[in-house]
Amino acid sequence: MPEYTAAFRQSGSANMLLTLGTLLLMLVVILIAAEVFTNALEHLGQKLQISEGVTGSLFAAVGTAMPETLVPVLAIMGGTADSAVNQEIGVGAILGAPLMLSTLSVCLMGLSVWRARGARGAIRPEAGGLKRDLQFFLGGYTLAALAMFFPQSGPFEFLRGVISVALVMLYFVYVMVTLRASGELVEQGHGTEAGKPMFLEKLGLSVNWTTILAQLALGVALLVGGAKGFIAGVEDASVLLHISPLLLSLMIIPIATELPEKVNSILWVRKGKDTLALGNITGAMVFQGTLLPAIGIALTPWMPRTEVLAGLAITLIAAIWLRVAAQRGIRVWQLGVNGALYALYLYIGLSAH
């Protein structure tokens, strides 16, 4: 009997080491992918002569949002035979993504320049685009939260469908408004500029549409592949640690799926490209606060629970705090408040279990 116990423990330790090794490897892949992607994206924005706001809030946000978009869609539409578990993972991933972006991602971006700029140092994105992103997000996410309190059956069930369609339309309005503002911003000096030569250029290739799109495709493929591998490692770790599917999808999966946004924003803010850095996060928040909840409302029960309501409330508080800070100019220390809000959510979520 002691031999079996020792063998079981040894097997468990080996599995945990393998899981940690996988997580580390996938993290390296994501870091490399983020460099490749942001480098190509800067050249694309420069070639198109568009503003940093469009490059960050639309192109970068949607491109790096692919992993967290795929997780809930694949969970809801397929996966295991247990549809209830699939729906829990789907809902948790949908709501966990904006929570992670508005709290932990923003905080890590601030921490990355804390030493260089100081606690009272300024974060200087283009103010109009930042405020626009946050206002669209707050409007869409509030609608998504209200949908949870409408009945799934009865005379008012149609309201869920109305909100779902409204969220989709809201995102398209956001895209049009953002694109319309681009020309004026470029004239004001907020055009996208590539800081370094394109990586494929170093291989002797010329910078043109083909090479820019090829490097973008390579970056996205590496981002998606790295994020999916990281998610698989996180799921393995959750089994070993005995974590529930809902808690996994609310707290752990978003850490993996939001890595591209975190890394891209850290790279940009350290280069002084604050508009790209914050736009990458807030643009992704709009995408994930409108289109993804529309899917959740249409295809899942979308019911309020303690962890879900706490996540909704903290995400909205974090976004409101950013919007208030943007009014007078964001300071590095203010981004630390968003990190404290994430710690508060961890406490609430773990206490509920």
Image: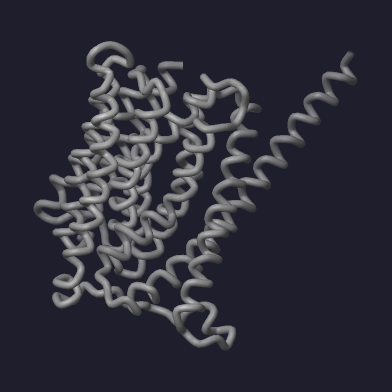
Left/right placement of residue 165 relative to residue 108 reads left
Q: Position of residue 66 (x, y in %)?
A: 46, 50
Q: Which residue is depicted at the point 32% across and 76% down?
A: 48
Q: Which residue is depicted at the point 34% across and 50% down?
A: 284
Q: Position of residue 151 (x, y in %)?
A: 28, 15
Left/right placement of residue 29 relative to residue 44 reads right
Instruction: Work out which residue is located at the far top of the displayed protein and give it.
Output: 154
Observer able to see residue 138: yes
Q: Position of residue 13 (x, y in %)?
A: 74, 33
Q: Is residue 148 above or below residue 268?
A: above
Q: Which residue is depicted at the point 35% across and 54% down?
A: 109
Observer able to see residue 116: no
Q: Is residue 145 above or below residue 234?
A: above
Q: Position of residue 210 (x, y in %)?
A: 50, 78
Q: Quadrant of the N terminus?
A: top right
Q: Nearer the viewer, residue 277 or 132?
A: 132
